[in-house]
Image (cartoon, rainbow, N blue to C red):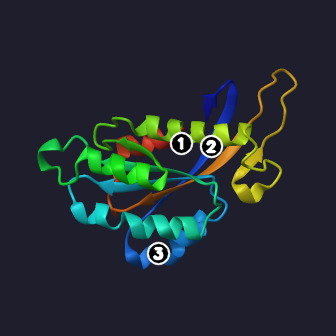
Amino acid sequence: MITIDGKQIKLQIWDTAGQESFRSITRSYYRGAAGALLVYDITRRDTFNHLTTWLEDARQHSNSNMVIMLIGNKSDLESRREVKKEEGEAFAREHGLIFMETSAKTASNVEEAFINTAKEIYEKIQEGVFDINNEANGIKIGPQHPTTSSTNRKVKLCQKEALLKTIGNPRLRSKITDL
């Protein structure tokens, strides 16, 4: 659970493999997702080169209003960098995505990536972009608690990885579970 603007938000997060063999399974995760994290490895140019394919797939099988954050992972391996930060920023700008670099190893910006994505989704809810009465949008309003005016919102996020083992770090798994 995270709190945004005084509201409790529970994120449901699925970590999917970025391998071609999992593509048909991954498509089912896009349906009903309010947001997605598209992750590439900054030390492997090939993962960046496949982003267009994964992005097209996500957009084809999801709600047109889905919030997508592009993440360049392994920022702790600067000396092995093959993809410049500016390239990631340019790709995100060109495709209307949010952008951030993270390190699963050090947990740098990992929590922030989820929080920023959830904030963007919340803003779309406030603007009326997502129909909160239609759970197919990946948003479910929880029960009102008599002692508080907070509304619980459950948001379905699909994390699409362009790399198989980006999120293999137990330290990161505990961060995700805490959200």
Which residue appears at 13% of the width and 50% of the height?
Answer: 80
Q: In the image, 118: left or right of 134?
A: left
Instruction: Answer whether labels 2 and 1 touch (C-beta < 8 Å).
Output: yes
Q: Position of residue 53 (x, y in %)?
A: 41, 70
User: Outermost residue toward the left?
Assistant: 79
Q: Check disc 2 and give the amino acid type.
A: Ile
- Assess disc 3: are there few (<14), some (14-19) or many (≥20) residues with their C-alpha within 10 Å of its C-alpha: some
Q: In terms of sequence position, does the residue under pointer 3 or pointer 2 come before the other?
A: 3
Q: Nearer the viewer, residue 145 or 158?
A: 158
Which residue is disc 3 drawn over? 23
Q: In the image, 157: left or right of 168?
A: right
Q: Nearer the viewer, residue 173 or 39?
A: 39
Which residue is disc 2 drawn over? 121
> What distance separates the C-alpha of mark 3 from that of mark 1?
23 Å
Which disc number belongs to residue 117?
Answer: 1
Q: Nearer the viewer, residue 28 or 62?
A: 62
